Image (tube, grey):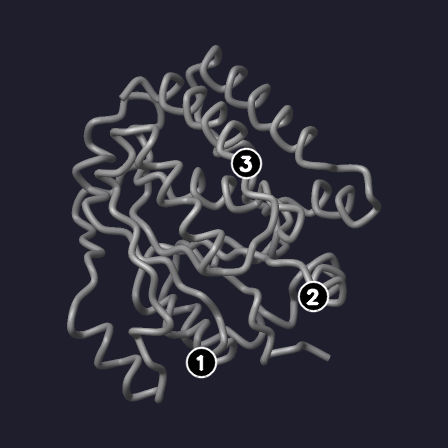
């Protein structure tokens, strides 16, 4: 049975190219959270993926992506199972079929919930977000701002940008959340992509998210190493 009152689902809503999966990976470096990839999540549940190995995986994958000049977000996108594409590409389908998509999740998701781990969902639009929040009302939601400006300046991964999207926090989203009796002031956390231009600011703001969510094991040196590898790879 799906645990819809689970309070350790972190939803990250961002523009493609805006650095959403980087932030997701940084939060996933905690022992309390699993990477958004089922094989890696299983390794962690088996006690075979400590933070040191997580960082090693991210650094190696970043290096390989940079050398190939092909950005695939470290492969951290196969968590919700084969139907995850519906979560990110077709908002109308998601809104109509959310419960079927959720029920079709890979069993690893249920294992992570049973083991009380933070899990992640990344998506790109308000309609998708509202559809998920209709079920998981206790989620934490990170909303990005200034993402289009950031996405337009990066080189590696630029092909993924969808320039006509604008996902700044707006009154419409807050009104929709209020209609669902959800307090946007408690639910939403804002991430400003301008912070990405500074390593120290990025690390500092990530630490605040760790503290806000109750994620253990924040390590500024680990986050800094990953940030430097990423920012150099995307050739900002």
Query: In the rendered view, does 26 fall on the left or right side of 200?
Result: right
| Image coords of residue 187 (percent x, y) | 37, 71
Disc nearest the viewer among 1 and 2? 2
| Image coords of residue 94 (percent x, y) | 44, 68
Query: On the image, numbered disc 1 is attached to which residue?
Result: 134
Q: Quadrant of residue 189?
A: bottom left
| Image coords of residue 24 (percent x, y) | 48, 46
Query: In the rendered view, does 171 fall on the left or right side of 198?
Result: left
Disc nearest the viewer among 3 and 2? 3
| Image coords of residue 41 (percent x, y) | 70, 47
Marked residue nearer the N-terminal end (3 or 2): 2
Q: Image point 25% across, 47% down: which residue?
A: 192
Marked residue nearer the N-terminal end (3 or 1): 1
| Contact between labelled residues 2 and 3, with CB atoms less than 8 Å apart | no
User: Which residue is at the front of the view, 213 or 172?
Assistant: 213
Q: What secondary structure is marked by label 1? A: loop
Q: Quadrant of residue 188?
A: bottom left
Q: Image point 62% across, 51% down: which residue?
A: 33
User: Which residue is at the front of the view, 143 or 52?
Assistant: 52
Q: Give the crowd class for mark 1: few <14, some 14-19, many >=20 residues within 10 Å.
A: some
Q: Residue furthest top?
A: 67
Q: Give the crowd class for mark 3: few <14, some 14-19, many >=20 residues within 10 Å.
A: few
Labelled disc at residue 35: none
Q: Image point 33% across, 80% down: which residue?
A: 183
Q: What secondary structure is marked by label 2? A: helix
C-alpha distance separating marks 3 and 2:
24 Å
| Contact between labelled residues 2 and 1, with CB atoms less than 8 Å apart | no
Query: On the image, numbered disc 2 is attached to which residue?
Result: 113
Query: In the rendered view, does 40 fall on the left or right side of 92?
Result: right
Q: Image point 56% across, 40% down: which residue?
A: 76
Query: On the image, numbered disc 3 is attached to which residue?
Result: 219
């Amino acid at each position: 049975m799906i645990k819809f009152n689970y309070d350790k689902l972190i939803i990250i809503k961002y523009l493609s190219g805006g650095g959403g999966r980087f932030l997701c990976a940084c939060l996933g470096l905690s022992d309390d959270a699993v990477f958004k990839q089922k094989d890696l999540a299983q390794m962690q549940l088996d006690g075979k993926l400590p933070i040191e190995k997580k960082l090693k995986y991210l650094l190696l994958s970043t290096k390989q992506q940079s050398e190939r000049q092909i950005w695939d977000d470290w492969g951290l996108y196969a968590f919700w199972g084969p139907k995850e594409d519906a979560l990110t590409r077709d908002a109308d389908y998601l809104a109509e079929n959310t419960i079927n998509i959720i029920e079709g999740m890979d069993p690893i998701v249920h294992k992570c919930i049973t083991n009380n781990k933070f899990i992640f969902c990344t998506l790109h639009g308000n309609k998708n977000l509202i559809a998920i929040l209709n079920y998981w009302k206790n989620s934490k939601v990170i909303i990005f701002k200034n993402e289009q400006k950031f996405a337009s300046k990066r080189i590696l991964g630029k092909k993924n940008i969808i320039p006509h999207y604008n996902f700044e926090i707006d009154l419409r989203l807050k009104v929709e959340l209020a209609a669902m009796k959800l307090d946007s002031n408690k639910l939403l956390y804002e991430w400003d992509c301008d912070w990405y231009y500074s390593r120290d600011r990025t690390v500092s703001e990530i630490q605040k998210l760790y503290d806000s969510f109750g994620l253990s094991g924040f390590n500024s040196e680990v986050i800094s190493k990953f940030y430097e590898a990423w920012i150099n790879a995307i050739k900002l």
